[in-house]
Image: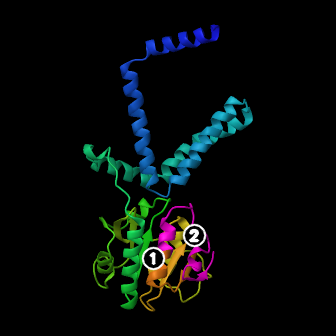
Amino acid sequence: MAIFNSIKEAATNFFALFRVADVIDILIIAFVFYKLAQISRETRANPIVKAILLFIAATWVSEWLSLNTVNYILRNVMQIGMFAILIIFQPELRSALEKVGRTRFSNLFTHDEEGSSENVAEEIASACAQMSAQRIGALIVLERYTKIGDIIRTGCTINGDVSRDILINIFIPNTPLHDGAVIIREGKILAARCILPLTRNESLSSELGTRHRAAIGMSESSDAIVVVVSEETGKISIAADGSISRNYTEDTLKKALNKALSFTDKKPSENVFAKIGGRKVWKK
C-alpha cells in the first residue's frame, strides 16, 4: 500500500509540474526527429545513421555499467566523429536544407501512396520487351529498402506513374532523357537521365558494356533491382546484389520483378533471378 501511495504521489507531483508548453515542446521535438528520419531514409546514408545511433547507445550503456575505459574511448571518438559526420553528410545536409526551404506547409504532413507492384512489373516488362525487339537500350532502377536519393538528384525529375509508353519514350535514342537511368520508387518514375556508379570489378566479361557495368555497380552499393536492355543484342538482364542474370523474356521478367517487389525478404535470394528465366553471367 505504501508503494502504491508513493507512486501515486510521484505521479501527482509530476503532472502538477507538467505544463501545456511542455507538451508542445515534446511534440515539436518528436516531429523534427520524425522529419529527419524521413530525410535520412531517402539516401544511402541511412545505414550509417543507424550505426551512429548504435554508437551513441553503446556510449550510454558503457557509462551506465561504469565501463570507464570503454566510455572514455567512445566519448573521445564521438567528439572527433562529429566533424567526420559533417564532412561525410555534407551533400545530404545541403539537400535536406534545400528540401525544407522548398517544402510548402501543407505538404509537411502528407506522404505518397505506394503503387501496385504487380502493375509496375507488368508495365516495365512490356516496355522492356518492346525496346528489346527494337534494339533500344534501357537502364531501369527499382529502389527497394535502401533509399538512393543522391542518385535521383543527378537526373531530371519526372514524378509520374510507371507506364509502358513513358518508359519507351524516355529511352528512344537522341531524345533529351535517353542517356542514363530511370529511377522508380513505390510505383512512381521519380527521375530519368540519372548517373549510376560503375562497378570497380575488373574481372567482368568484355561482353558487358557500360549499361551492364552501371547496373552491377548500382546493385553493389544498394539493394536496388536494375533492369538492363542491351542496345547491341536486345537481351534483357537483371542486376541484383552485385550479380547479373540475362536472357529474360517479357513473361519471365514480369515474374522476376513481382518476386523482387513483393518485399517478402529484405534481400532477394542470390539465385532468385537465375531461377526465373535468367542465366547468371556474373556473381560477385
Q: For label 2, count other residues whose C-alpha is less than 10 Å away and answer few (under 14), some (14-19) or many (20+).
A: many
Q: Quadrant of residue 250?
A: bottom left
Amino acid type at image mark 1: Lys
| Magenta stretch encompasses residue 259 | yes
Element type where label 2 sits in the image: loop
Front residue of this view, candidates 251 and 164: 251
Element type where label 1 sits in the image: helix
Task: Using residue 87 as the reference point, say whether residue 6 is left or right of it.
Answer: right
Picture coordinates of residue 284 (x, y %)? 63, 74
Task: Using residue 233 as the reference point, say whether residue 109 is left or right of it.
Answer: left
What's the coloring here? Answer: rainbow
State the residue position of label 1. Answer: 254
State the residue position of label 2. Answer: 241
| Magenta stretch encompasses residue 166 | no
Q: Residue at the location (39% across, 27% down)? A: 25
Task: Please provide the residue range marked out in magenta.
Answer: 256-284
Q: For label 1, count other residues whose C-alpha is less than 10 Å away and answer few (under 14), some (14-19) or many (20+).
A: many
